[in-house]
Image (cartoon, grey):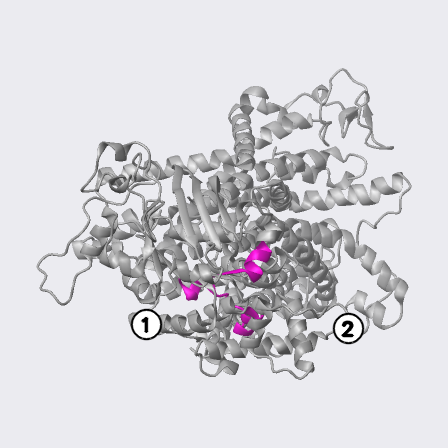
Amino acid sequence: MSGQTVKTRKGEWEARLADIKYSLYLLRKNPLVMTGIAIAAFFIAVALLANVIVDPKLAYPEGYPGEMYPFDRKYMWNANHFIQWGPGISLYYGPEFFYLGTDSYGRDLLKMIILAIPLDLYYAVVITLIAAFFGTLLGAIAGYAGGVIDEIILRITDVFFAFPGLVLALVLASILERSLETLQLAIVLVWWPPYVRLMRGQVLSEKEKPYVEALRALGASHTRILFRHILLNSIFPIIVQATMDFGGVILTFSALMFLGFSPSPAIPELGNLAADGYGHIFDAPWVIIFPGLTMLIISLAFNLVGDGLRDVLDPRLRR
Amino acid sequence: MKNYLKKQGKDQPILEIRNLKLDFHTYRGEVKALNGVDLKLYPEEVLALVGESGCGKSVTALAITGLLPENASIIEGEVLFKGENLLKKSKEEMREFRMSECAIVFQDPATYLNPVLKMETQLKEAILLNKEALKKAVIAEEKGEKIGYAEFLAMKANPNEVSVKDHRVSRRKIDKMAEKLIIDILKLVKLPDPERIIQSYPHELSGGMKQRTMIAMALARRPSIFLADEITTALDVTIQAQILHLLRELRKKIATSTLMITHDLSVAAEIADRIAVMYGGNVVEVTSTRKLFRKPLHPYTQLLLRAIPNILKPVERLESIPGTVPEMINPPPGCRFNPRCPFVMEVCKGERPKLEEVEEGHEVACYLYKR
Amino acid sequence: MKLYEYVIRRLILLVFVLFAVSILVFYLTRGFPRGIAPWAPYIHPKMTAEQIEAVIKAHGFDRPIYEQYFYWLRDILSGDWGLTGTWAQGKPANEVFFNHFPYTVELSVFGTLITVCIGIPLGIISAIKNNKLPDHISRIIALAGYSTPSYWFGFMLQLIFFYYFSLWGLPHLPSSGASALGKPNITGLPLLDGLLSGNFAYAWDEFIHLILPSFSLAFISLGFLARIVRASMLEVLRQDYIVMARSKGLKERVVIYRHALKNALIPAVTLTGIFFASLLGGAMITEYVFSWPGVGQQALRAIFQGDSNFILIYSLVFATIIVLANLVVDVLYAFLDPRIRY
């Protein structure tokens, strides 16, 4: 997609459309990507319908009369289920059937997972978008402006890169008041640096291309060149990175919740649900297994898509 | 020419391509790159394959050596080397073919040399492939014979009966012999200071030097067929002249059959015995160099030659061939030149004309000359 | 630019980065207004008001923040990193840090080894058999690893290899902690010390304890490495010099190993270097799940408690490691690729 000459408006969109059609064709040829897309679509559908399928009030035991969650439902597995998790597993003989067992509040785990999916997806999308947006913006400015501005932005990015793993996010999460929004902020601050580098690299190489010189000769302003032309041409690696990061962000978010940074232990969120079962790994393994497995599948789906997209959009592998 | 060859028992072509048709599968459709190529290469001659970019010359070379990319498929035809059809050979057999019978030198030495390996490795591996031959050379040397590249060549032409199985030759000796021969070959291609070149990396050498090393790698395998795919195109004119001069000298010393692929008629004129003109995936005319320039028969060749400006006469306008090169996904039916041909007839749009000999040593594929 | 000029420039940058990191962390842990007081980790409920005052004065929390910073700077330059909070019995921060660091080193080394040994071949196969079945299988493995939540995977390993194996009567791997058999006394690395001092039972025990956590770490990252190797190999295999090598009649295996690999592995090597360095940062979650006594686990506790001294020494040490690793890797790149020689 890069290295194009300046086209007329009509020609430009036609060319882009043809490119997109070709990309879709390549995508269709790859079975892994199609699987990823299917799974991702499934989860998005679940997320959108979650509040319809499952009553969200079921997540908060405090709101209910005591009989809703009788004591003997804590960490329960069904007695008539065909998987025997092992000796010492508490069994449940009541009228209700829990496909995936119950957690420490006696809530049906399957229902909790369904409720958790939209929450996780929402925050993952928001975090990725914000991080990508700011990172790309800074990277574009750094790459295009060069000089002092470039140095400053680069140094700031270096500082953020120097923090090992999740430390910064954890420190931030621990000092700010506990809420999902602050977690969001903490993660955004950790995930934006890669975009800066990525976008800066793209802009640097685009800057040298002849069409930029042509645009300058035509009298286009810097902002116009940067945003209307260079950005559009460099957007694809960003999209790929964002899609792949999506899987990573979801993992980070739930990891933070798992470590104990969630505002309330009852919030239906995949990491939070897993943390619930941490003390009882061996006698109620399902509490960690299933939320984690769901996390894995969601992340895998998006990573498959992102990976496939990267293959498809790699300009050297086309045609 | 033919009678002379007959006397030498060399009137049979060493390489013959019959009606080769080849397609490439792409997203846009089937690219019908080769449309029934007929070609004969005789022993010890230099045959130039001339044509515009995109006419299928390099593809032909790749088809001969078995280096076609995965999306290529051969529809029809044969490539006969000493009577055997190369297209029917296994990958392993083709590998051996490339190892000892056929060497190809490519166009751009900068990208065709591995940047992280020393020249030593890349040169030696060409010759170390044939351990048997090297063993024989070492043994002969130990017997007191002087072994240089010339002798090494001769050993291929006249294999002696010495069995190698009984002698054990150490690896070091083989390696040393390989190195000696390589240095000899480098001297043969007129590279100064071969010892230093061996220790260099490709990016430390100039374009002309790199191209010579590529030729050296080809010579190291003592090929019966030498394919040169636009080897001078990436070089500037003075270097080009040097390489051609080198090839002419080598030609006297080394009796290989050479297929010289080029788009430049002047290069062909310099060095070829015969010239084959290709257009749109077909060979349209084949004859000796003199005859081609004196009496071109095919309309395309005639227009091509007219397009070359004559520096001795005053020229006001450059002549060109009207129209454009055919699009290979939907090529014109019949003779692919018919949209641009000044002498086009109805029959030209029907079935493609086959290459036929219309005079002694002069073949054309055109209905103008059909008997 | 000459090599040493480049290195010097980067080192100056390192100093700058360290300052920036220290200021940032210092402010966040001590200056930022939040619910808990910055001296909270250093006191316990049984203390009297005077004792608390004394602690506050001793740590300097009563001074304004910029003064605190300068005192802290002066202290660390003379080697005093301050004391840790009650969660680590108030021992000096650097002592706690360096006691636990070798364990993290062990984990990182093993983790990296496994990642490299599985990840690189996976990537190569993927590239050679591009778009055929082995490619798809190794892609799924790679991506699955990359998508796995580390807490979940560690737990699954423990469940299967410890709990269920012992239930089924199979020999099982320990689920947590490091070996308790001996004490690291020579190099500080338990495994190495066990071998060096002849206490092979100790070394073996430590090794067994290392298996699950290293594998847990490795599984997640080998996917990433495999992807890089695959992309790199595919790029290389399309190059003209590969066609040239084949045209010489070389065996396909030789073409791949001698010509393609050397070119393709350059980015992989650099990536491994950086990966190793970041592992040294302590894979916190893995250490947490496996109760591995490494530095990441300590850092996690410190962060929860708000122990600024420990968090500071931890952040600074690892900022240094990461920046140095990046530098080493960049220089290494120059050596590996003859075209970029200085």
Question: Residue C31, percent across and down?
Answer: 52, 60
Left or right of A197 in this view: B322 = left
What residue is rendered at 45% in x and 63% in y? B44
Image mark count: 2
Left or right of C147 in this view: A288 = right
Q: Is residue C276 above or below residue A57?
A: below
Magenta run includes residue B117: yes
Magenta run includes residue C337: no
Look at the numbered disc 1 and give the secondary structure of its residue. helix
Write down the residue under mark 2.
Answer: C187
Question: Residue A244, percent across and down?
Answer: 52, 44
Protein chain holding label 1: B
Comparing B208 with A185, the one in front is B208
Write down the residue under mark 1.
Answer: B241
Q: Amino acid at mark 2?
A: Thr
What residue is rendered at 35% in x and 37% in y? B329
Q: Taking the image as drawn, is residue B315 in sight? A: yes
Q: Taking the image as drawn, is residue C264 in sight? A: no
Question: Residue C289, percent across and down?
Answer: 72, 49
Comparing A138 with C3, the one in front is C3
Q: Amino acid at mark 1?
A: Ala
